[in-house]
Amino acid sequence: MMHPTYPKRLEQGSYLEPPLRPFSLSFLRRAVVFTLLVLFFALCLSLAQVDLARLADGIPRMLRWAAKSWPPYVGDFDRMLFRAAETVAIATVATAVATLVAFPLSIFISKNLSSPSWVAAPIRAFINALRGIDTVVFAILFVAAVGLGPFAGVMGMTLHAIGVIAKLNSEAIETLPKAPLEAAALSGASRTKIVSFAVLPSSLPSLASISLYVWEANVRTSTILGIVGAGGIGIEIKAAIDLLDFQKLFTLTVIVLVMVTVIDQLSAWLRRRLV
């Protein structure tokens, strides 16, 4: 006996909804999944120590701090702008170096290019490790290795960006049509020629767009690298917070917002031109 499909339209124009079967296997399965999700979220709330009462007590304190931030401090505005430029420089150098290093790595881990497993597997594990460790963690390690300053920020951001760009590049390469790659392989072209004349021209707009997106994200991330001593405007932000200098903190916040907005708009404009 065939069961009617739902929703079923009746002669008078209304629709007959499917009956609720609370003891059916599918209903019980969905109920169990929903219950587990609710319990998981409740556990996350507990572990995160979410306390709305503390938030209610803290909001007036934040408002008092905001009132103290006016008028903004512009005494050493040139130094703040220098730190902002340093922040953009860190992100730009790191993204450029990461793009150059990540492209050949993305070739090896792209599944449609059939790299040997003994080559692809360790490279894929290395890239996943770079993506899994945050830029700030790398920056802390390089601060300990090479000392304070923007160079530590560049190194830390470069490593993380390599993992991100290589992963996104490989996914873009895997979406390429198979026909041109197979035709190049059947013609007897070497792997280098296939990459140079088939893969790179087809994927270049996507690869450039990925690098621009990562550059945009790196600018936002680099604003906090100074907090761990890795250069950039974060150094000034940390000093203002430590001294409870809310007027200077307000000025620095505005600079960061303007800088990030300009970079976001520039990156979006460039991506529209490339894709």
Image (cartoon, rainbow, N blue to C red):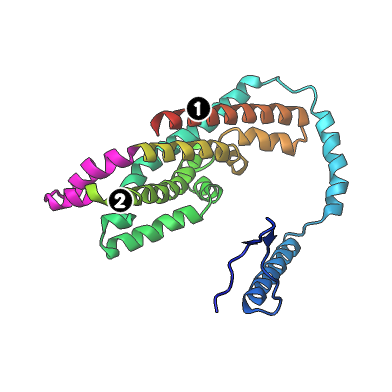
Q: CA distance from mark 2 to mark 1?
A: 28 Å
Q: Regarding mark 1 in the picture, which secondary structure is present there?
A: helix
Name the mark on residue 266: 1
Q: Residue at 43% across / 41% down in the picture?
A: 210
Q: Secondary structure at mark 2?
A: helix
Quarter holding the N terminus is bottom right
Q: Amino acid at mark 1?
A: Leu
What kind of secondary structure does the magenta stretch mostly adopt? helix
Looking at the image, residue 211 sits to the left or right of residue 12; the answer is: left
- Looking at the picture, how far across and down is residue 25, in whole percent? 63, 79
User: Residue under circle 2?
Assistant: 107
Whether label 2 touches label 1, CB < 8 Å: no
**Boundaries of the magenta span:** 181-204
What residue is rendered at 66% in x and 79% in y? 24
Q: Is 80 on the left-hand or right-hand side of 205?
A: right
Q: Amino acid at mark 2?
A: Ile
Q: In front: 141, or 222?
A: 222
At which x and y percent is residue 120?
31, 60
Q: Residues within 10 Å of mark 1 (few under 14, many from 20)?
A: some
Q: Is residue 124 left or right of residue 131?
A: left
Report the side of 141 relative to 202 (left or right).
right
Image quarter for residue 246? Answer: top right
Q: Earlier in the sequence, mark 2 or mark 1?
A: 2
Q: Residues within 10 Å of mark 2 (few under 14, many from 20)?
A: many
Q: Tell me: residue 100, above or below residue 32.
A: above
Residue 222 lies in what quarter of the image? top right
Residue 38 in the image, given as x and y percentages of width and height: 71, 66
- Quarter containing the C terminus: top left
Quarter of the image where one finds residue 109: bottom left
